[in-house]
Image (tube, rainbow, N blue to C red):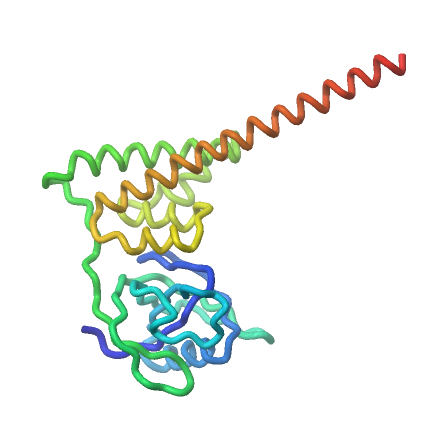
Amino acid sequence: MLQPLPVLPLKDTVVYPEIVVPLAVGRPRSMAAVEAAMQEGRQFIVVAQRDPGVEEPHLEDVYAIGTVVKISRVEKRDDGAQVIVQGDRRVRLLAETPHDDYLIVTAEPLMDLQHEETGPDAPEIDALLRVNRELAQRIASLYDSENGAQIYQQLVGHISDPVIQMYRIASLANLTLEQEQSILDCEATLELMQRINGVLTHELRVTELRREIAEQAREDIEQQQREHVLRQQ
């Protein structure tokens, strides 16, 4: 069990372990939580809200699984602050501690997911890991045919831990908040690999279709232009 920590509810973001994320903080209670964390070890819990319309969320308004983060930097602004954080560990939120200025909860740490080389799931995990890496590289190349491989290496390929690689991919993918949360909720490495595989497979197909549509539209425009020139002649 962890000691009670300030909580920063997030309207549209999920933060994963070891991933660095800039957070825009503007609500008074959120600013108070950040300021309290700066005085108490530079740590607090970030967790996604179930309904982004709730302005002063309590425990029942946020998801059950969040992430303890460490504050790297706080940049004050006229409308609040940008807080650079790095995810530390997943936690399950258990109980709210009454406080007027910001949300405080007690939480229990969850087991870190590991890429184990032995065990009944190891062959399937390894297979999915390779497929997921290949899918991510193909998607990067579709977005930028010349620099896709370099972009993948800079954003994902340099990470040595396979689990953190998957979290990094999830943080970059075009996901709904519910999808992002479902990845954070994964309790086993195989489950994480399977969910990332589903995300990447869908993203690859969408990216391919968008490219096909764009190419078809370009060909149609070029054909119309040629026909227009011929009519003019």
Q: Is residue 198 above or below residue 185?
A: above
**Quarter that holds the C terminus:** top right
Give residue 21's position: percent from left, percent from top.
43, 59
**Quarter that holds the N terminus:** bottom left
Q: Is residue 208 above or below residue 160?
A: above
Q: Nearer the viewer, residue 61 or 6?
A: 61
Give residue 136's position: percent from left, percent from top.
39, 37
Q: Dividing the picture into quarters, in which one does residue 7 lie?
A: bottom left
Q: Residue at x 41, y 78 (%)?
A: 33
**In the shown orientation, is residue 18 left or right of residue 147?**
left
Q: Residue at x 38, y 43 (%)?
A: 156
Residue sitting farthest toward the left: 119
Q: Residue at x 40, y 72 (%)?
A: 8
Give residue 14's position: percent from left, percent from top.
39, 59
Q: Is residue 220 above or below residue 188?
A: above
Q: Dividing the picture into quarters, in which one does residue 196 lie?
A: top left
Q: Dividing the picture into quarters, in which one does residue 111 lie?
A: bottom left
Q: How many marks?
A: 0
Residue sitting farthest toward the right: 233
